[in-house]
Amino acid sequence: MKSLEEVFDGFKNKTVLVVGDVMIDYYMHGQVSRISPEAPVPVLKLGRQEKRLGGAANVAMNIRALGATPILCSVVGDDSDGAAFEQLLEYENMPNKGIIRSQNRVTTTKLRIMSDLQHLVRVDTEDVHPLVDLDQKSLLHHIKNLLEECDLVIFEDYDKGTINPEVIQETIALAQEKNIPVAVDPKTRNFTKYQGVSIFKVNIADLKDGLDIEFDALEESQFENAVKQLKNSVKAENYLITLSKKGIFYDSEKSSGKLSAHPRQISEVLGAGDTVISIAGLCLTLGLPLEFIAELANLGGGIVCELPGAVPINKEILLKQAKENSILKKYL
């Protein structure tokens, strides 16, 4: 790659299979002007309502925003929210050929009731039990068929039950047979099951939960020990650990280091991890160096934190800021 434009153009030729827990992010916006006489709770005068694709579907939105083609592979309920999810896919012009409608679970929804930008309450509707055998077989059948047209697999795990050890192991084995890289953003339940992946990306909170350890990420020796435990527990080619306001850590056999975060007016960190794994995965398909991958993902994760809610990356803003970045320049 000779320029950032060439890197971003390279994304256009990639198709990404996103496997994981999808959901609907449902927002009810209004204003509070008084306390209820019935109970000490605010009364919301309801205004705008909106539904967005969430969970692994937000990864797909990021992949598309970067210019690549996403294919979601997941299980939703055979219910009204499942129908709404497919309508949202159609509205976003994304294929639904990897989506399975199941009578054995409900579609995950996260309802956020908000006054201006203030969260009042969140109401979750979900099943978190593992897939029944029939749904698991259907999911693996879809994965096997869809892999034929993909350049990358991303596991986006929210511990909602779509992903289990069998799905992980069979998918990784199928991808390896076809030399397709696999990137993962894990959660606690399956944390150590992602053996042999190309990129294992995790944040500090999930690292602590996944390894069942406690440490001070700002204390260098404690952080280094946590990294050693991670590498002993999960064998991967590359590791990325997002450090929130402190940036990102990257590690492989060839290179290792920390990159600082960039100054931001943080609105909300929701969805930043989806952006990081999307950028990192696509960069991996282009054979870019890990430090480059980490810094571009670091930039993207920061950009989406300046906006409320889980939103996909703006490709033009990312490219503009990337052009001004000294770390990225040294590789092009």
Image: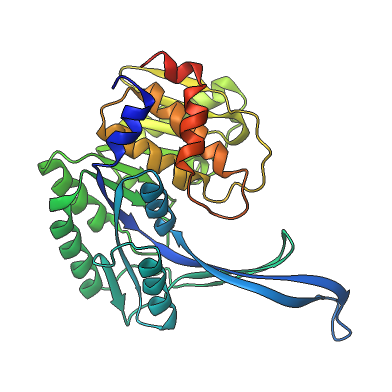
User: Could you tell me which quadrant the C terminus lies in?
Assistant: top left
68 left or right, relative to 141: right
314 left or right, relative to 92: right
User: Could you tell me which quadrant the N terminus lies in?
Assistant: top left
Depth check, front residue: 39 or 297: 297
The answer, for residue 176, to whether it is visible in the render is yes
Q: Residue at x 65, y 29 (%)?
A: 263
166 left or right, relative to 8: left
Residue 86 percent coordinates (x, y): 36, 72
Residue 80 percent coordinates (x, y): 43, 83
Quarter where residue 176 is shown: top left
Depth check, front residue: 185 or 81: 81
Residue 114 percent coordinates (x, y): 70, 66
Q: Is residue 142 above or below residue 214?
A: below
Quarter where residue 330 is shown: top left
Residue 248 percent coordinates (x, y): 51, 29
Q: Residue furthest top?
A: 330
Q: Residue furthest bottom?
A: 38
Q: Is residue 308 above or below residue 39?
A: above
The answer, for residue 189, to whether it is visible in the render is no
Q: Residue at x 63, y 53 (%)?
A: 308
Q: Residue at x 43, y 28 (%)?
A: 294
